[in-house]
Image: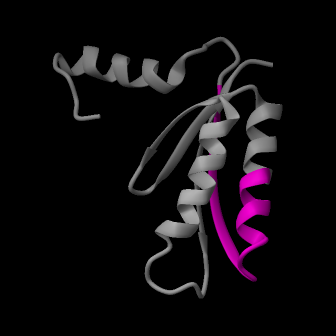
């Protein structure tokens, strides 16, 4: 099986308006994983072999769940077995078609 992309967003419910401290712990776990990833204001995209990505998503959920009684997660998976390096490659392709760099 080839690499996949997974968009992931997680937040505790009932933790107040700011959840950045809790989310920062999850981002630290993702950084320690060694998997390619990028984070923006709305979530994180992780690239890797499916088993490694799913294991990491599970670890992230378990970490958040250990601190809060209710957690919400959103996951969107894009799998394409004939391509690698898609985390950057998809953006490169878009820039090529636009004829200019996009804000990253």
Q: Quadrant of the N terminus?
A: top right
Residue 69: x and y in percent read 75, 83
- Inspect this view and state whether residue 8 appears: no
70 w.r.t. 75: above or below? below
The answer to if 16 sits in the magenta stretch is: no
The answer to if 66 sits in the magenta stretch is: yes
30 w.r.t. 37: above or below? below
- Inspect this view and state whether residue 99 appears: yes
Q: Is residue 59 left or right of residue 93?
A: right
Residue 73: x and y in percent read 65, 64
- Which residue is at a point 50% across and 26% down the rendered structure image? 87
Q: Is residue 16 left or right of residue 10?
A: left
Residue 76: x and y in percent read 61, 48
Q: Quadrant of the C terminus?
A: top left
Quarter assignment of residue 83: top right
- Which residue is at a point 59% across and 88% down the rendered structure image? 14
Quarter assignment of residue 99: top left
Q: Is residue 43 left or right of residue 68?
A: left
Q: Magenta part of the protein: which range?
A: 59-79
Q: What count of labels does the image hold?
A: 0
75 w.r.t. 16: above or below? above
- Which residue is at a point 78% across and 33% down the rendered structure image? 52
- Which residue is at a point 36% across and 17% down the rendered structure image? 93
Q: How is the image coloured?
A: one colour
Residue 9: x and y in percent read 57, 58
């Amino acid at each position: 099986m080839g690499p996949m992309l997974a968009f992931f967003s997680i937040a505790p419910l009932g933790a107040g308006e700011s959840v950045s401290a809790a989310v920062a712990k999850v981002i630290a776990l993702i950084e320690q994983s060694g998997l390619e990833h990028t984070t923006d204001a709305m979530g994180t995209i992780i690239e890797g072999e499916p088993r490694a990505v799913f294991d990491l998503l599970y670890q992230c959920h378990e970490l958040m769940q250990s601190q809060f009684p209710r957690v919400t997660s959103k996951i969107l998976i894009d799998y394409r077995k004939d391509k690698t390096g898609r985390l950057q490659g998809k953006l490169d392709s878009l820039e090529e078609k636009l004829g200019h760099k996009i804000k990253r």
